[in-house]
Image (spheres, rainbow, N blue to C red):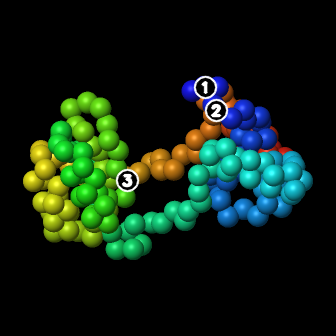
């Protein structure tokens, strides 16, 4: 599988870092930030999209501003895969779902209005098998940019250099 991975250079890595921090950047601004011309950065972004590295762009929404006062992690024990998939499709409160190894078969992140709403969603899942729920109190890290493993140490140094130039 490693041979199927695209080869990314430091420009690609910086582009990924910048777009994950702010996907609304214009190609001109992105080019300025990574020190490439607008046509060059546009071509690189298209190649990253074509290679399946960039799979989409989306708005990050604050659930509390939409009336969802509770976010929770729900762990679902072993159960029928097709039935869990049907429930996930039917429940808009499920923001993310992962089929995992270990004691549980599924881990889901849900967003609900209040405790009564949480109870209704859990009721819908609990007839499958045992569930365990943890309410999320704080989120000190969310949407951490993901970079190629070798590039992780390169980006903070580049960002620090950029900040020094601004000062």
Q: Residues within 10 Å of mark 1 (few under 14, many from 20)?
A: few
Depth check, mark 3 against mark 1: the one in front is 1
Report, in whole angstroms, how far the alpha carbon at label 3 lies from the one at label 1: 27 Å
Identify the mark at residue 96; answer none if there is no mark.
Answer: 3
Report, in whole angstroms, how far the alpha carbon at label 3 lies from the one at label 2: 25 Å
Q: Mark 1 points at which residue?
A: 2
Instruction: Indicate the quadrant where residue 152 lies.
Output: top right
**Furthest residue toward bottom:** 66
Q: Name the residue under label 2.
A: 5
Depth check, mark 3 against mark 2: the one in front is 2
Q: Which residue is drawn at 32% across and 66% down?
A: 92
The answer to whether the residues at label 2 and label 1 have Cβ atoms under 8 Å apart is yes
**Label located before the other in sequence (3 or 2):** 2
Figure check: 14 above or below 151: below
Most foreground residue, 78 or 64: 78
Q: Where is residue 19 in the image (x, y as percent from the top left)?
A: 67, 53
Most foreground residue, 127 or 74: 127
Task: Find numbered disc 1 in the image and state the secondary structure of the residue it sits on.
Answer: helix
**Furthest residue toward left:** 127
Task: Find numbered disc 3 in the image and state the secondary structure of the residue it sits on.
Answer: strand
Identify the mark at residue 34; answer none if there is no mark.
Answer: none
């Amino acid at each position: 599988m490693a041979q199927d991975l695209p080869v990314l250079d430091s420009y690609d890595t910086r582009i990924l870092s910048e777009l994950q921090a702010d996907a609304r950047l214009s190609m001109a601004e992105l080019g300025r930030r990574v020190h490439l011309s607008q046509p060059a950065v546009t071509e690189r972004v298209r190649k990253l999209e074509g290679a399946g590295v960039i799979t989409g762009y989306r708005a990050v929404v604050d659930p509390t501003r939409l009336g969802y006062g509770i976010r929770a992690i729900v762990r679902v024990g072993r159960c029928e895969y097709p039935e869990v998939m049907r429930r996930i499709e039917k429940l808009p409160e499920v923001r993310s779902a992962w089929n995992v190894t270990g004691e549980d078969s599924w881990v889901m992140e849900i967003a609900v209005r209040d405790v009564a709403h949480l109870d209704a969603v859990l009721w819908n899942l609990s007839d499958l098998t045992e569930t365990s729920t943890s309410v999320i109190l704080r989120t000190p890290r969310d949407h951490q940019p993901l970079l190629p493993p070798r590039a992780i140490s390169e980006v903070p140094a580049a960002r620090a250099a950029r900040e020094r130039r601004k000062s």
